[in-house]
Image (cartoon, rainbow, N blue to C red):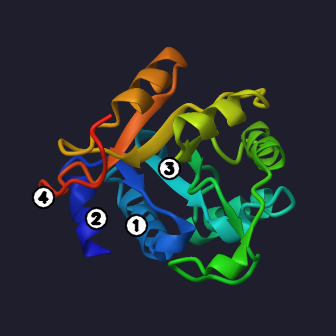
Amino acid sequence: KEAIIEAVKQGYRHFDTAAAYGSEQALGEALKEAVDLGLVSRQDLFVTSKLWVTDNHPHLVVSALRKSLKTLQLEYLDLYLIHWPLSSQPGKFSFPIEVEDLLPFDVKGVWEAMQECQKLGLTKAIGVSNFSVKKLQNLLSVATIRPVVNQVEMNLAWQQKKLREFCKENGIVITAFSPLRKGASRGPNE
């Protein structure tokens, strides 16, 4: 909590979390304290969270976001992402995900529920994480509101050239995670 408050004091404004990280409560408490102390206004913060695979079902999306908002002590997110393009058994958290828990991913239904989250004002923007070009093509074919972000692993060793080009052509911003991967390669530089 103290580290987050100090980060705000030093000018940090974007905070990325996820239900699966177990950090939403601590982040929410720290951001509330920072706002209450007058260190920053809510409008100056950019808070991102993600829908975990156990809630990657059309009927669970809105309630999962509402739960994250309650835990974060926020009225809205700035960005809500589908964490992974797959679904698993509701209510059964495990990581790594057990193969027997995987279920078909209803991209159309889940994205419609994500769009509903934005229409309800629960999030200002919606996007995805860990989506390949093929997964993005499938999503774009059914989306009314297009994803604004695709958050993926990207670094000097894994630059994801094809994915970057596709996202640029389709107006999707790439947010890189693990940009300093210690030089270890994790895939072809395509």
Which of the image's four quarters has the C terminus? top left
Give yes or no for contact between labels 1 and 2 (Cβ–Cβ under 8 Å): yes
Q: Of marks 1 and 2, which one's residue comes earlier in the chain?
A: 2
Amino acid beneath label 2: Ile
Closer to the camera in the image, 67 or 82: 82
The amino acid sitting under disc 3 is Asn
Residue that numbered label 2 is attached to? 5
Which secondary structure, mark 4?
loop
Q: CA distance from mark 4 to mark 2?
A: 28 Å
The reply, left or right, for residue 40 in relation to residue 125 is left
Q: Residue at x 70, y 81 (%)?
A: 100
The residue to which callout 1 is attached is 33
Q: Residue furthest top?
A: 169
Q: Is residue 125 visible?
A: no
Mark 2: give few (<14), some (14-19) or many (20+) Cα within 10 Å. Answer: many
Which of discs 4 and 2 lies nearer the camera? The answer is: 4
Under tag 2, what secondary structure? helix
Name the residue that disc number 3 marks: 130
Q: Give the residue number, with chain letter if any, for mark 4.
A: 182
Q: Pinpoint residue 120: horizontal percent, then vertical percent.
A: 79, 43
Asked if the residue at tag 1 contacts the one at tag 4, i.e. Cβ–Cβ closer than 8 Å, the answer is: no
| Mark 1 surroundings within 10 Å by alpha-carbon count, few (fewer than 14), some (14 through 19), many (20 or more) | some
Give the label, 4 or 1, closer to the camera.
Answer: 4
Badge 1 amino acid: Glu
N-term mark: 3 or 1:
1
Residue drawn at 21 percent across, 63 percent down: 6
